[in-house]
Amino acid sequence: MTTPRPARFPFALDIPGTVLRTFGVAGPEDAVVELDDRLLSVRFGFWLLRTPTANLVSAEVSGPYSALKGLGVRLSLADRGVTFGSSTRRGVCLRFRRPVPAIEPLGLILHPGATVTVADAEGLADAVRRAVAR
């Protein structure tokens, strides 16, 4: 029996490649969200966020964002959420039951949510909502 492939949602790469390379994003394969029955995985250059699908609570499409809030890797001081941003147009705000590590390698900062600026924001939000409903 074969394992189903995860649904893949590449990031919208709207900022210049030279800027993206500073975050470790050399191409589309370096900035992608994958979701299957067991795991949500967010790869954004040097950063990786992984959490069981059962840890997902919700997904909401949001945006547009200011360049300061929507580009690069950013920690929200208001709620400790993490943003992986490559576009100011729109993204998906993901919420977790239990906060997850992502922004620093020791896992000392945990995030209750993550915003990802994927090209198909509605598709990712719908896929997460289906996963939450299971």
Image (tube, rainbow, N blue to C red):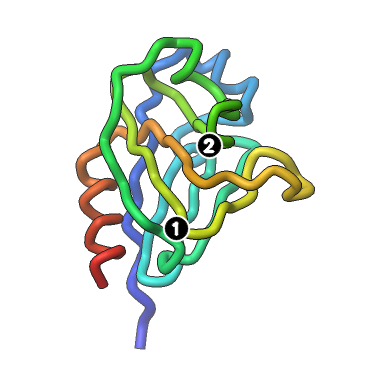
Residue 40: mark in rendering = 1
Residue 15 location (% of width, % of height): 44, 15
Mark 2 residue element: loop
Vertical placement of 56 versus 49: above or below? below
**Of callouts 2 and 1, the N-terminal one:** 1
- Answer with the quarter of the image where residue 90 lies: top left
**Residue that mark 2 sits on:** 81
Please name the residue shown 26% across and 35% down the image.
61
Pick the front one: 14 or 57: 57
Compared with residue 70, is residue 42 higher up or lower down, i.e. above or below?
A: below
Residue 43 location (% of width, % of height): 53, 44
Q: CA distance from mark 2 to mark 1?
A: 16 Å
Q: Quadrant of residue 119?
A: top left
Number of other residues with Cα within 10 Å of mark 2, as a class: few under 14, some 14 to 19, many 20 or more: many
Question: Residue sitting at 43 percent across and 71 percent down?
Answer: 38
Query: Circle 1 sits in a helix, a strand or a loop, which is it?
Result: strand
What numbered label is drawn on residue 102? none
How many residues crowd around disc 1 within 10 Å: few (fewer than 14), some, or many (20 or more)?
many
Q: Amino acid at mark 1?
A: Leu
Image point (47%, 59%), residue name: 97
